[in-house]
Image (cartoon, rainbow, N blue to C red):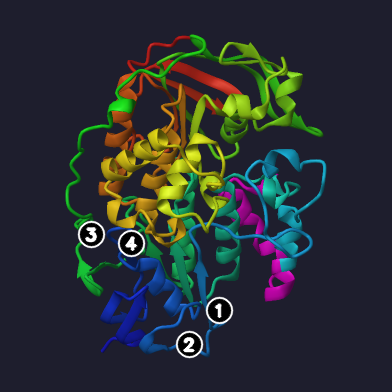
Amino acid sequence: MKESFVSIKNLNLKFQQKAVLRDLNWAINRGENWVLGGASGSGKTSLAKIISGLQSASGDININFDQTSSLPAETLFVESWYQFKNLEGVANFYYQQRYTSQQAKETLTVHAELVSYGKEKGLHFDQVEPILEALGFATFASSQLIELSSGEHKKLQLVKALWLKPQLLIIDQPYTGLDAASRKNLNILLDQVAEESVQLILICNDSELPTCITSFAEIIDGNLVQVDAFESSTGAENHLGEIPAFLKESPVYSSQNIVKMVNVNISYGEKQVLKNINWEVKAGEKWLLQGHNGSGKSTLLSLVNGDHPQSYANELYLFGNRRGSGESIWDIKQHIGLISPEFHWYFDPTATVWQSIASGFYDTVGLFQQLPYTKSTQVDELVQYFGLTENKNELLSALPLGKQRLVLLARTIIKNPELLILDEPCQGLDQQQTKHFNQLVDELCSNGMTLIYVGHFESQLPTCIEKRILLEKGEVKVVESLNTEILS
């Protein structure tokens, strides 16, 4: 007879009077490793937090830790994104701070964070070094936490979890922001800790999983349902409605030259992040930007966004004007619509869906003024187009992740920008949501809008993409067209 490890009976959870979990039951036997998948907003993360003791709910939960094991008798929940604090113990960061804080030491370095964690948990530092090497994270020891990209933050979370090796390890979106090599190495590391009796619950919809996974489940109508691998449902098919008339018009281009970089170099002290970058983006082109974690993608985009202070020291042209010729950062942002994981993190949590979309007119992270009638009408049209009518007065932060990303996509295109920058916009979305999101991107870009799209998964990209630029260790490795004809 199998020995019970986790027993959950009659678990109930309501959120804003809506039932999320309904008399949910789940039995996890010792030695089992689960993947919890399914639709965004079904209650997966809430269930994980309840099991971890981070969220309250009614019902019975019993975890039968092995008191004879050398592994810590605890449950560790790794959240979908890393929440860190500055040296004063607060977390009131703003989006551009990542690029303006290199000189001011505002957060711990990766090394200092790991030393602190090791002391707190009684861990030996030599045991973490192989994990750092496997995830390609050893070179980030001197980087401040605020300087890290979303993929690098995920690696730091994973390093700490794999170093601790708790008896129950729950990871929400373990592959978020990771390049292909890092995903492969993570699966090897997960198999290794599973062999040491760490039991896993992975919350994701990915198909490339560690071999130790034994069981699959999803939450349907508040109940946990065990399913076969790769057969989890991803919700009903989404059908695109009629695109709003104001987005059928081609953007008004101020120049046919959207981006031009000539021998661009970016360094922090002795660390060179970008080296001799030459790249041109013409009006209407659709680009895919790729590269391993730490290759320089986020820094490259920060130059295009106008966020990076070192842009003035380089030969950089945006929308026909050389950077530093008198234009402000807000002049640049008028031309751009942007989604990125970091921007999502720092967005105003008190803004409603309607306010969040409307703020795109002014490039703010919340709405601080009343809109004229014409602009209000455009917001209403986008709310309807994106299927958000019933959510328009809800807080953005209260929506499931999939709907939050649709809201932010609506925000990015509300002003029909010349350039749409989508930096890993489908992180955390299920397969159907990703397909729907990219269909929307294809539809929205059909009017001649210029696109720069960052994505690690080749199978999860819009079909409109025509060209690709690949970075490797801060240098341009490849520039090619869709038919792989090398352009430079």
Name the quadrant containing residue 230: bottom left
Front disc: 2 or 3: 3
Mark 1, residue position: 71
The residue shown at (29%, 80%) is: 26
Query: Considering depth in this image, is 373 or 234 the residue closer to the camera?
Result: 373
Mark 2, residue position: 66
Q: Is residue 440 found inside the magenta-colored segment of the image?
A: no
Q: Percent x, y for residue 338?
A: 49, 35
Query: Considering depth in this image, is 207 or 469 the residue closer to the camera?
Result: 469
For numbered disc 3, what is the local secondary structure?
loop
Nearest to N terminus: mark 4 or mark 1? 4
The residue shown at (49%, 35%) is: 361
Mark 3, residue position: 229
Q: Percent x, y for residue 151?
A: 54, 47
- The quarter of the image holding the N terminus is bottom left
Q: In whole angstroms, how far apart are the C-alphas of marks 3 and 1?
A: 29 Å
The image shows residue 97, relative to residue 52, as above or below, that is above
Residue type for callout 3? Ala
